[in-house]
């Protein structure tokens, strides 16, 4: 698939379309880099066809993202520290093509790279610092609260309820082949309950959070490795800081790919420490005591939640996450649960590391 030239033409600022490649490994949208030529020379843009099954209200979604980009760029000390969203000629931050698809465009951030898995301590430090800075910079976003793009996105208990429903309906006859994973998922429900009680206690502040902080959603400088910019802003909305920290822990401490059928790599404690140090520098003093208390178990929570989501999608016939082979969502679930077992066994050690830094 390519970006149709009529779509590129809708954003006339880009110039004349000369080439296109697919970009990244996202599970939701279709992403491309597009080369264009204008009197100013050649320039690269990132075009995304937005998944409007997942994000149903595109105008509200894109209004969130425009506000966030403008706010972050007003604070950025370097143009590469904030995404620049382009508008169509009539000033709209997205374009709907004749097939009903929605498209948006960012200026490509030059000399940047992402890490998929197997990150070094230096890389996770920079990723932690970038996400911390991102949260801090969004703390004073002016205006109305952001639109909730996916309500209940990190309501882990509701995710477990959705799994229960998927088991009851068993629309694809897959429950029989997933007993071990289902038993583990339901036996681990206290992880979700504990966090739910903490949230309900009101001790955790509601902040603007990113909600999808896997490693490859942070761009690093190709040469220096410095953290540049947090991308993939669709799920930015009111949330809990621990979800952002926890999702980074999930990816930073295991060298395995998200669908590694073995996922036997040992948990990397140095990466946990580096991630935490970077994050603490980035948020620069704004964490509350309850947030500090939750850091050690945040990785388990997010790993559990994602395992449950992959398992639910597997049972429902792979309708949400893109898959590249049959059974991939079950393999992803197993990999998450394998990492989760290791994380749970190490929570006291994580707690000691957090205490030392605190
Ligand atoms: C999806 O779009 P992408 O690939 O960055 C998902 C995240 C999951 C992640 C797992 C909107 O993120 O919640 O953690 O896959 N995003 C959405 O790889 O559901
Ligand atoms: Mg992404």
Image: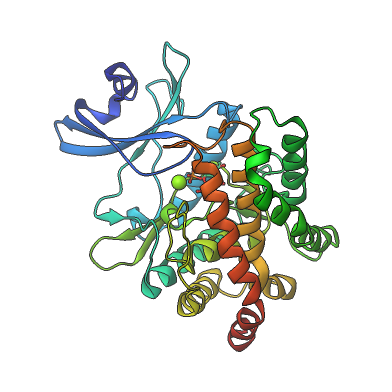
In front: 155, or 323?
323
- Residue 243's quadrant in the figure? bottom right
Please give the count of numbered marks on the rendered protein.
0
Q: Residue at x 47, y 66 (%)?
A: 264
Classify residue 26 as left or right of residue 337. left
Q: Residue at x 16, y 37 (%)?
A: 42
**x, y percentage for residue 346?**
62, 77
Residue 149 in view (yes/no)? no
Residue 74 in view (yes/no)? yes
Q: Residue at x 63, y 84 (%)?
A: 358
In front: 6, or 200?
200
Q: Residue furthest top?
A: 98
Q: Relative to residue 141, is residue 328 depicted above or below?
A: above
State how the image is colored. Answer: rainbow
**x, y percentage for residue 191?**
74, 62
Q: Residue at x 56, y 45 (%)?
A: 330
**x, y percentage for residue 1?**
31, 25
Classify residue 195 as left or right of residue 75. right
Classify residue 220 as left or right of residue 260. left
- Residue 45's quadrant in the figure? top left
**x, y percentage for residue 296?**
65, 74
């Amino acid at each position: 698939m390519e970006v149709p030239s009529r779509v590129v033409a809708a954003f006339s600022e880009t110039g004349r379309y000369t080439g296109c490649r697919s970009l990244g490994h996202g599970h939701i949208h279709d992403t491309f880099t597009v080369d264009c030529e204008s009197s100013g020379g050649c320039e690269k843009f990132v075009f995304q066809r937005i998944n409007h099954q997942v994000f149903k209200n595109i105008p509200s979604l894109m209004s969130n993202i425009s506000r966030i980009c403008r706010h972050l760029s007003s604070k950025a000390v370097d143009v590469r520290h904030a995404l620049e969203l382009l508008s169509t000629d009539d000033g709209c931050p997205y374009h709907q093509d004749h097939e009903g698809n929605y498209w948006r465009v960012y200026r490509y951030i030059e000399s940047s790279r992402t890490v998929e898995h197997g990150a070094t301590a230096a890389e996770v430090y920079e990723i932690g610092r970038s996400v911390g800075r991102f949260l801090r910079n969004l703390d004073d976003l002016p205006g109305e609260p952001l639109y909730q793009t996916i309500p209940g996105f990190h309501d882990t208990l509701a995710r477990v309820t959705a799994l229960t429903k998927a088991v009851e309906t068993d629309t694809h006859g897959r429950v029989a082949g997933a007993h071990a994973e289902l038993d583990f998922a339901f036996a681990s429900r206290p992880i979700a309950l504990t966090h739910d009680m903490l949230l309900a206690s009101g001790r955790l502040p509601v902040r603007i959070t990113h909600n999808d902080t896997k490693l490859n959603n942070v761009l690093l400088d190709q040469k220096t490795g410095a953290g540049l910019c947090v991308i993939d802003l669709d799920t930015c909305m009111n949330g809990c800081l621990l979800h952002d920290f926890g999702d980074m822990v999930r990816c930073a401490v295991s060298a395995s790919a998200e669908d590694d059928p073995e996922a036997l790599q040992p948990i990397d404690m140095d990466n946990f420490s580096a991630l935490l140090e970077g994050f603490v520098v980035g948020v620069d003093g704004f964490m509350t005591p309850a947030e500090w208390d939750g850091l050690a178990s945040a990785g388990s929570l997010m790993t559990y939640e994602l395992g449950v989501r992959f398992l639910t999608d597997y049972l429902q016939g792979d309708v949400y996450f893109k898959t590249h082979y049959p059974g991939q969502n079950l393999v992803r679930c197993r990999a998450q649960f394998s990492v989760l077992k290791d994380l749970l066994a190490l929570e006291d050690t994580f707690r000691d590391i957090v205490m030392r830094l605190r």
